Image (spheres, helix red, strand yellow):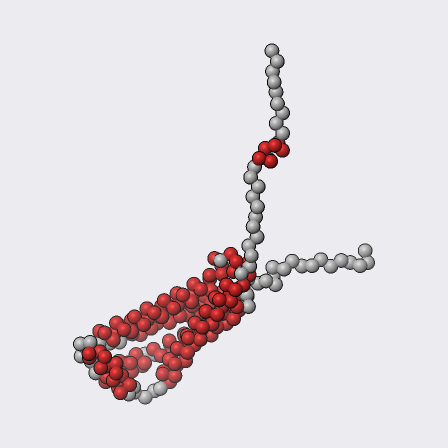
Amino acid sequence: MEESFSIRWDEDEDASEDVIIAVPIRPQPNTLRVIGAVLVIGGLLALFSGASNLLTGMDDGPTDPAMYEPVALQLQSAGEDVTSQEIAAYYDAIAEKGYYEVLGTLETCAGFLLIVSGVLLFRRHSYGIRIGVTGGSLLLLDAVAGLYFLRSVEAPSAMLSLTLNILQILVTTCGLFCTALPLLPLFLSGAREALDPNSNQLPIPIRDESE
């Protein structure tokens, strides 16, 4: 009785396997430019707010109650029993604790760092990410400091306290956004590939003519 046999080559098994084709990731420098432009705009806003707070803190005189007369009228129309003199005294109390100096310094430093970060990312330099995260972290610290100062002095009106707390929540949101935005290129493959273009270039071999 004859037995049939067959020979199985390893090459046949390899040929049946699926071939995986690696698709190269295309750099997207425009994404970095958009992120950089947004950071520069945010930095300018923070710089303006910081400069305004520093100028306000430099005024050593008492606050003129007439400045807060429209605010007092709005609060009174909402049912709050508060006067412009009480509002002015409240702002003077938080100013004596260093509210404007601390917030002005933090916002000015944060704004400067965010502008530098935006320019660096616009030019596709990766170390702009660290600088941007530092600037955003200063804005978060600014929000925490602002809440501390506002709660260290009792507000003359519950509505006024609520309004100021809402403003600090907005500052916190801006701080979170400015902290997360510089990290975005690390999670976008196209933007990540566009970082540091000069360092990604392979060195050109130099041929020795004497050979």
Kindly indicate the quadrant of the structure image that contains residue 68. bottom left
Q: Is residue 126 above or below residue 150?
A: above
- Front position in the image: 62 or 42: 42
Residue 81 lies left or right of residue 99; in this view the side is: left
- Front position in the image: 132 or 16: 16
Residue 11 lies left or right of residue 182; in this view the side is: right
Q: Is residue 194 above or below residue 168?
A: above
Q: Quadrant of the N terminus?
A: top right
- Residue 14: x percent and y percent? 60, 35
Mark yes or no: residue 87 visible. no
- Residue 65: x percent and y percent? 26, 86
Mark yes or no: residue 22 visible. yes
Residue 90 lies left or right of residue 106; in this view the side is: left
- Residue 71: x percent and y percent? 25, 81
Residue ID at (19%, 79%) = 76
- Front position in the image: 110 or 149: 110
Q: Quadrant of the C terminus?
A: bottom right
Residue ID at (67%, 59%) = 203
